[in-house]
Image (cartoon, rainbow, N blue to C red):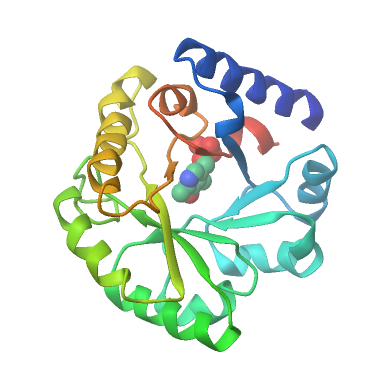
Amino acid sequence: MDYQQRISFVRERIRTACERVKRSPDEVTLIAVTKYVDVEATRELIEAGLTDLGENRLQQALPKLTLLADAARWHFIGSLQTNKVKDVLPYFSVIHSLDRLSLAKEIQKQAEKLDIQASCLVQVNISGESTKSGLSPNEVRDFLEETIRLPRIHVCGLMTMAPAVHDPQETRPFFRGLRELRDTLKADFPGLEHLSMGMSGDFEVAVEEGATLVRVGSLLVKP
Ligand SMILES: *Cc1c(COP(=O)(O)O)cnc(C)c1O
């Protein structure tokens, strides 16, 4: 399948998942995770109609960013070292991996210097696996209370990664858990609009559970 076909295939599956739960597909943004491919392939994906791209490492992303910074909206989806913030912020529209106060403070500082607002999602370790980064669900409220005082940071939602499982249906409780957490917090933090959840193996379940940003890599782009 060429890129055009793969994109249609994924979009169609998103549309069907939306239909099952009576959501509008317009509520779901497909982020193509381009970490597996080079600059040329990334350019082809943009030309094939993708508008939102995700990368998890700055170093790997730089050649693409240098040439294609303005050709797409870039999402930073990997864990972010504090010392990389100043290089990440100029390129990326959304950071999906805000998971600690020291990082929030550095984003505040660098965003101030650049005179921008930084859109961030708080990463939550909803499954509690020790290998996963993110705040535990019961830490999120206090964290939001702190970050809301940082005027350059706009927390626009929550992000999670489900455990690797055989049957995608097994991810449902984790995605539902993130949505319920968001719904609970939204009364006090109305900016929590987005849920970044779902990857190649489980994006349909995530969409059924309310994802607004799905991060699809291998299924779309892997050679
Ligand atoms: C690589 C990656 C993805 C995409 O994973 P696929 O299974 O290839 O779709 C999504 N989110 C994060 C944080 C990633 O690192």
Taking the view exactly as shown, the residue that stands out farthest to the left is: 138
> Which residue occupies 56% across, 23% down?
24
Give the image quarter of residue 139.
bottom left
| Left or right, residue 75 beside residue 194 | right
Left-right relation of 61 to 135: right
Vertical comparison of 82 with 209: above or below: below
**At 85% from the left edge and 43% from the top edge, which residue is drawn?**
47
Image position of 30 (left or right of 201): right
Position of residue 66 in the picture relative to residue 14 (left or right): right
Residue 183, x across and y down, in percent? 28, 39
Question: Which residue shows up at 51% across the image and 69% down it?
Answer: 118
Query: What number of labels is visible?
Result: 0
Residue 158, position in %: x, y? Answer: 37, 49
Please tell me which residue is depicted at 35% across the width and 80% down the height of the picture: 105
103 or 132, which is in the foreground?
Answer: 103
Residue 30 in the image: above or below residue 7:
below
Report the quarter where the C terminus lies. top right
Near-viewer residue (84 or 135): 135
Q: Quadrant of the N terminus?
A: top right
> Where is residue 113 drawn, in percent x and y?
55, 88
Q: Note whether residue 196 is visible.
A: yes
Residue 2 visible here: no
Where does residue 213 sit, x and y in percent of width and height?
51, 40
